[in-house]
Image (cartoon, rainbow, N blue to C red):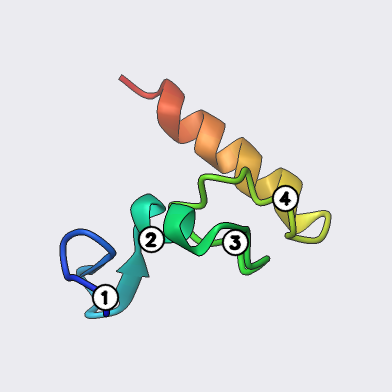
Amino acid sequence: MLQEGTDFYFNENGLMVLTAAYHLKRGRCCGNGCLHCPYDFINVKEPKRSELLKQRQEKNQKP
């Protein structure tokens, strides 16, 4: 059973967002380009994978 706050949360639009903790329990990248993917989007097809990695890197570089 999923636990709110641990496995998911609801964003400002009311959509459920799965956390990195959930994905780690799942054990693999699903290929959907999830926001908190801890597997560096390994199963996401190009060019989307490169775009997502670039966005993540840019987000992490902001002060």
Q: Which residue bears the numbered disc 3?
A: 33
Q: Which image quarter holds the N terminus?
A: bottom left
Q: Which residue bears the numbered disc 4?
A: 42
Residue type, mark 4 in image: Ile
Q: Quadrant of residue 44?
A: bottom right
Above/below status of 2 relative to 61: below
Name the N-terminal-most of marks 2 and 4.
Answer: 2
Q: Which residue bears the numbered disc 1?
A: 2
Q: Nearer the viewer, mark 3 or mark 2?
A: 2
Q: What residue is drawn where x is 63% and y is 67%?
A: 30
Of all residues shown, which one is farthest toward the right?
46
Q: What residue is drawn where x is 63% and y is 40%?
A: 53
Local crowd at mark 1 within 10 Å, few (<14), some, or many (≥20)? few
Q: Residue 60 in the image: x percent, y percent? A: 43, 28
Q: CA distance from mark 4 to mark 3?
A: 9 Å
Q: Tag 3, which secondary structure? A: loop
Q: Tag 1, which secondary structure? A: loop
Q: What residue is drawn where x is 81% and y is 54%?
A: 47
